[in-house]
């Protein structure tokens, strides 16, 4: 009897164990199936992100995370997508979720640090970035971001040290060297900045931005030949680089080479119609070479790009006045005032034009408006004298 009971117990245990094993396998298979499905959707999100479709990527990664809530990489990348979409609270939420799933996810620590840097929470940023480095001391991006934190709080030497460390770990990392080159220039170390930009060019000889920055430094040092050579390299590798074309044109203008200056100002405008400096510089070139109609036409183009800019209308008015076309000058001075009714130059220039037209009462009014806007201007003494003389003329007329 006892033997029968014992055998029944053993058999029951065997049956229960088998059932438990089957249930356990079922759970594992279900989990594996969920992860496989999540990975499939996750890859779709990665494909969208590589093509710049950030919102589509975020949707896919969100789906992947719903299928498998333990998928740390999906949570991390979803946070990254939200960051790029400007949704910082959501980015922070999902990066924190990533760390709940995996405390050693150094990229999440670093990304949170970068986010806190953007929010001006520098102590918190540094704390998170250092945790990333503790986990992976060779993670270059963390040193780059740590440099940003130090630079933001003006601890320049520590910023330089961070970016040097990034460059040491990854000698061909352009971002680390770019940051070094910029910060060297900001503290007056032009020689070191030039050397670092030159290192960037050795890594990528076609990197137009590096050539452009070299041009800026040489230009600041009045080494115009080297500046022009650098800018010309920049536009060779990026033909629509508006700022570089503009600076080349400026250097040609210094050499009195009007034809090439004009060519590069026009190239700057063709490269970027919103690059406003090129319009004003080209108009100035035309004015200096007595091509007033061309100058007016170019400023007219600019006024269509920036219809609310009072300075442009004022400058067009000034050029018309220079030609003696007072009615057109007055029209554009009034447009300037309409665009911004607190622009003193437009009132003053309008008054000058009205004097020439013999409209003294209106001229006095506009001179007075100018004085009201800039009551402490040294020029007001001269303006008040003009008002006095005009008032006398006006009285004699009456």
Image (cartoon, rainbow, N blue to C red):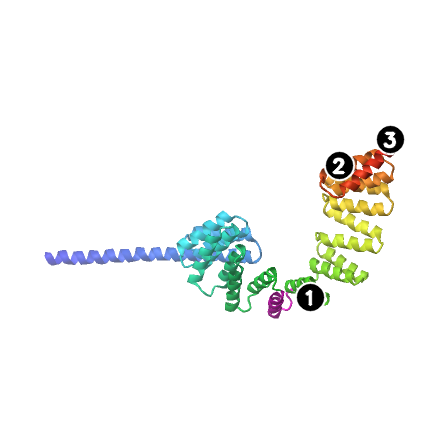
**How many residues crowd mark 3 within 10 Å: few (<14), some (14–19), many (20+)?**
few
Q: Disc 3 on helix, strand or loop?
A: helix
Q: Quadrant of residue 337?
A: top right
Residue 153 appears in the rendering: yes
Do residues under tags 1 and 3 come within 8 Å of each other at their CB atoms? no
Start and end of the magenta stretch? 190-207
Residue 201, horizontal then vertical, whole percent: 62, 68
Percent coordinates x, y for residue 56 in the rendering? 54, 52
**Farthest bottom residue in view:** 202
Q: Quadrant of residue 12?
A: bottom left
Numbered tag placed on residue 132 in the rendering: none
Residue 124 image position (x, y, % from top left): 46, 52
Residue, disc 1: 230
Task: Say whether disc 1 or disc 3 marks the residue closer to the N-terminus.
Answer: 1
User: Residue at 73% of width from left, 62% of height from top?
Assistant: 248
Q: Earlier in the sequence, mark 1 or mark 2?
A: 1
Report whether 150 appears left or right of 245.
left
Reading the image, the residue beneath label 3 is 395
Q: Is residue 382 left or right of residue 60?
A: right
371 up-or-down from 206: above or below = above
Mark nearest the camera among 1 and 3 is 3
Magenta span: predominant SS is helix
Q: From the image, state whether disc 1 or disc 2 is nearer to you.
A: 2
Q: Is residue 389 magenta?
A: no
Residue at the image position 74 percent from the left and 45 percent from the top? 311
Q: Which residue is mark 2?
A: 369
The residues tagged by marks 2 and 3 sit, at their Cα atoms, a distance apart of 21 Å
What is the C-alpha distance between the residues marked 1 and 2? 48 Å
Please give the name of the residue rendered at 53% of the width and 63% of the height, measured from the top-left corner.
160
- Counting residues from the start of the chain, the first of labels 2 and 3 encountered is 2
């Amino acid at each position: 009897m006892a033997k029968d009971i014992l055998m029944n117990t053993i058999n029951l245990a065997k049956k229960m164990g088998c059932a438990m094993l089957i249930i356990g396998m079922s759970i594992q298979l279900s989990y594996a199936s969920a992860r496989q499905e999540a990975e499939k959707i996750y890859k779709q999100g990665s494909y969208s992100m590589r093509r710049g479709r950030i919102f589509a990527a975020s949707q896919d990664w969100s789906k992947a995370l719903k299928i498998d809530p333990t998928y740390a990489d999906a949570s991390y990348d979803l946070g990254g997508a939200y960051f790029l979409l400007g949704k910082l609270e959501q980015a922070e939420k999902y990066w924190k979720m990533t760390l709940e799933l995996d405390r050693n996810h150094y990229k999440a620590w670093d990304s949170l640090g970068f986010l806190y840097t953007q929010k001006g929470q520098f102590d918190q940023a540094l704390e998170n970035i250092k945790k990333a480095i503790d986990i992976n001391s060779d993670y270059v991006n963390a040193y780059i971001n740590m440099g940003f934190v130090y630079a933001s709080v003006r601890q320049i030497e520590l910023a330089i040290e961070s970016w040097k460390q990034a460059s040491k770990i990854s000698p061909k990392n352009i971002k680390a060297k770019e940051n070094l080159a910029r910060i060297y220039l900001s503290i007056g170390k032009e020689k070191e900045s030039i050397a670092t930009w030159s290192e960037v060019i050795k890594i990528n000889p076609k990197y137009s931005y590096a050539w452009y920055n070299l041009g800026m430094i040489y230009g600041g040092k009045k080494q115009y030949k080297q500046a022009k050579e650098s800018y010309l390299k920049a536009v060779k590798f990026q033909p629509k680089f508006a700022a570089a074309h503009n600076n080349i044109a400026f250097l040609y203008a210094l050499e009195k080479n009007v034809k090439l200056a004009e060519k590069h100002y026009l190239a700057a405008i063709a490269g970027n119609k919103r690059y406003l400096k090129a319009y004003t510089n080209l108009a100035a070139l035309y004015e200096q070479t007595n091509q007033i109609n061309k100058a007016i036409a170019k400023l007219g183009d600019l006024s269509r790009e920036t219809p609310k800019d009072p300075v442009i209308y004022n400058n067009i008015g000034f050029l018309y006045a220079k030609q003696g076309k007072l009615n057109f000058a007055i029209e554009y001075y009034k447009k300037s005032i309409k665009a911004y009714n607190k622009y003193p130059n437009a009132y003053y220039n309008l008054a000058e034009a009205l004097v020439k037209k013999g409209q003294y009462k209106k001229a006095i009014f506009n001179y007075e408006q100018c004085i009201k806007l800039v009551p402490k201007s040294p020029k007001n003494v001269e303006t008040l004298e003009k008002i006095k003389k005009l008032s006398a003329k006006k009285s004699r007329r009456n």
